[in-house]
Structure formats: C-alpha cells, structure tokens
Image (spheres, rainbow, N blue to C red):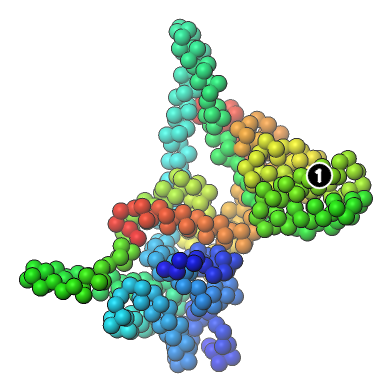
Amino acid sequence: MSEQGCTRPEVGDLLAAYELNLLEAEDRLRFESHLETCAWCVEELYAHAPCSEDLLTAPGRHAATLRRASRASDSGFAVQFRAMLRRLLQPRVLAPVGTVAAVALALVLLMPGDLMTPGAAGLAIVEPLPYQTLDLRGGADSDLAGLLAGGLQRYADGDYAGAARDLAAAWAAAGTDETWSDRSQAALYLGLSLLLDQRPDEALAPLRVAGASRLLPVAERGRWYLAQAHLLREDPRASVPLLESLLQSPVYGDPASDQLHAVREICDNPAGE
Amino acid sequence: MTFEQAPEIALDPLAAAWLSGDERAESKLFEFLRVRFLGIAKRRVQPDHLEDLVQEALQIVLRKGREQQRTENVLIWSLTILRNVIGNHYQARKRENERMATGEMLLDQLTDEAAPPDQFAGSDSGLEQALARLAEKYPRCGKIFAAILESLETGGGPREVSQRALAKVQRQTPDLTRGGFYTALHRCRSQLRALLEKEPGHV
C-alpha cells in the first residue's frame, strides 16, 4: 500500500461512487485514468473488492440491514436512558426524600445539554452550502470587499475557522453601512462558517440577519441554518417557528416538514416515552 | 463497438467491445488489468511467483468474463478474482509449510511469505455487522448507504441509480450537490472500512 495516500484527492473522492457503479461514463473514465498513476486508490479498490461485490450483488438485503439498525438506534439505549433519568427527576418521585431532591438538583445543574433535551442536536443537518461568487457592489470600500472575498475563498476551500474570522472582520468593518448590498449574504456565509466550525452560539446573530434578508433565497437559507443552530444548541423549541416558516419553500419544504415532525415529538414528549 | 474511433474508453465498454470480438479492446483491457494486478501482487508474493499468479488470475478473468458476458463493474470483479488467486496461493503455501514442518523439514524461505490478514475474503455476516454498526454510530452514513442500496435494488443505469439516491438524500439535505454526495459517500466508506477491520474474520 502506498503510504502517500491518494495522488489526486479531488478525483480519488469518486472511489466509493465508482465501486458502487454510480458514475457515468465520463467520470468512470476520469477515475480509471487516475488509477494509472495512483497506487493508493488501486490498493483501496483491491482491499474492499469483496465487500463492493457483496453490496452490488444483494443491495436490497443490505439496505434492510441498515434500516433495521437505524430503527434500533432511534429507540436505543441512549434515548431510554435519558427517559429514565427524566422520570427519576420528576418532583412526585423526588418529593418524599429531601436529600435526594438536592442530589437531583445538582444533577440537573451539572447535566450536559444533550441529556436535557434528548436528541435535538442529532436532528440538525449542517452541510456546506455550495459556494457562490457574490456580486460585490454598493458602498463598501476595497478593504471590505477584500475581506469578504478572502473569507469566501477560505469558505470555498473548506477552511471554516479562517472563513469565519475574515467574514467576521468584514462584518465588523461594514458596521451599519446600509449601502453595502452584500450584507445579508455575508451574514449567511459567516453564520454557516461558524456552524461548520461547531460554534452554533456565535452563529445565531449573523443567521438572524440573513434570515431577515429581503432576498428570498438568502432569507430561506438563513432561517434554515438558524433552525439548525438552535437544534445544535439543544433548543428545539426555538427552531419550530423557523421550520414552520419554511414549509411552503420549494427547496426547504420537505426537509423542514420532516424535521418539524421530529422536533415536535421531542418537544411534546421530552422524556422520549 | 467503435473502439477504433475511441482510443480512450472506460473499462466496462472496453469489456463489451472485447466480448463482441474486438481484439484491440481485449489487448487494451488485459494490459490495463495486468499492470494493476502486478502492482498489487508484487506487494504480497515473492517475485518468482508473481508472473504466474497474475497470469492465472488473468486467465480466470478471461474465461469467466466470457462465460458470464461480464460488462459491468469489470475492474472490481477482476480484483475479487485476483484476491481469490492470491488467497489460494497462500493457503497452498501454508499447507505445504505445515506438511514440511511435520516432517521436520521446514525451509526458511517459506516463512518469508506469511499471509497478511487481508488476503482472505471476508464473511458476509461481517459486512452485515459492520453496516449495522455504521448506521448506529454514523446515522447519516447509514442513510446515504441505504439510499444508494435501495436505488440499486430498484435498478437502472448508473445515472438513474445515482440520481434517485441523491434525490432521496436531498430530502434531508437540500443543498447537497452531486460532488458533495460522492465526497460524503467516500467518507462514509472510510468509516465502513474502519468498522470492517474491527469485525473478526473480515477484511
């Protein structure tokens, strides 16, 4: 096995799709041409070949395995454990014993967020929005435009921490400049970079600005990602009105509906019973 | 098949051309496989066995390919044949080694070729267990694989299968592009590989 890894990761990323016969002729040829110079990818195909053949030979059976495992996981130990904790923490159970109540209070105060509201963060969907070049215009000076362009380039490169830093600087430099027409789009990408950098608390403010944009696509995206930020913060109730506002969206309608259903289950039945 | 007009062609159509009697397609296909097979086998067997093993594997590909009229996923299928040939080679060497050891005639040179753990085909239950673990541990990966496998089960060409699976995943992740989908699948495959390596008796 080559110790160097794939020689061209942008082509090597097609490997799994190649194995499962998902690639059209042009991409297949591109990947197979890549194999002429990449020993790492050849070794990977070789090592995984029996599994790939198994998956292709009996896809229905393996899909059923995955569905069963997903269902088992959804009703698994973690959820039941949280439910048990919540039942124990109910006042009628704890009231007779004052000392136990004190311990329970301490537990509540020390309990991690994901035990307070089971599974809310697990519902969040945060995928990088495809990078789109912004049409820079308005009253922004060249420094501001440079910061914005630099931040977006870092975002496109997958450097979300760097993107958040540059976009936050652009945001701060713009201040309340109402002539800067890219404000809401910059807010969207700043919020999204913070989310992807796993900083949902900081993402709230810029995503609220994006969600209030007069540009409908920006507003919908802003509200969608703001809802995801609330879920990541284990605050599912805050995501409900945002998801409701997206139900008629041609882009976000279906996922918002699915997510809303799951969020309401958590809110209506926080013990997971 | 217009192989003469298409010097650059993917392996599956090349196999179709070979099966329809195109000798140049056959030559090109088997040269591609031979080079890849040699690269793989030279890391696993002693040099004096290398050419023989590769030739044996290519002969099987040639014979079974004709029998089965194989024109889909030819490379992956060929690699499983190579794995079996190398695996059989190790088994034969092991038996020979044991026989000689019993007669107190163990030769040092045979120990140079110990079978690495990845040489034997994995169990089907190992894959099932790893898939179940994948869905539990990485739910999103489980959903991506399930969408693809369900689409494969429904049938159709690569474009149709891929589009149907992507559309299903996009219900949860509307902004996911085709490129992002393939990249996500690639990462999930890495997780599956890691889980498979933990399954006893599997690759």
Q: Is residue B129 above or below residue B122?
A: above
Q: Is residue B7 above or below residue B123?
A: below
Residue at the (62%, 53%) spot, across then down: B170
Looking at the image, how many numbered discs can be counted on the residues? 1
Splitting the image into 4 quarters, where does residue A56 fall? bottom left
Q: Residues within 10 Å of mark 1 (few under 14, many from 20)?
A: many
Residue at the (51%, 76%) spot, across then down: A37
Q: Nearer the viewer, residue B8 or A34?
A: A34
Residue B113 seen from this side? yes
Residue at the (54%, 35%) spot, across then down: A119
Does A113 sit left or right of B190 as displayed?
right
Q: Is residue A257 above or below residue A33?
A: above
Residue A254 seen from this side? no
Q: Residue furthest front?
A: B108
Q: Nearer the viewer, residue B189 or A246?
A: B189
How far from the left and from the top, in percent, is residue B102?
8, 68
Q: Nearer the viewer, residue B68 or A266?
A: A266
Q: Read off the chain for label 1.
A: A
Does B184 sit left or right of A65 as displayed?
right
Residue at the (55%, 92%) spot, across then down: B4
Q: Nearer the viewer, residue B104 or A176?
A: B104
How far from the left and from the top, in percent, is residue A151?
75, 53
How far from the left and from the top, in percent, is residue A72?
43, 41
Does B67 sit left or right of B159 as displayed?
left
Q: Residue furthest left?
A: B103
Which quarter shows the C terminus of chain B?
A: bottom left
How far from the left and from the top, in percent, is residue B189?
48, 58
Q: Is residue B188 above or below residue A175?
A: below
Please give the residue where the numbered disc 1 appears in the rendered image.
A171
Q: Looking at the picture, which amino acid does disc 1 mark?
A: Trp
Does A208 sit left or right of B177 as displayed?
right
Q: Secondary structure at mark 1?
A: helix
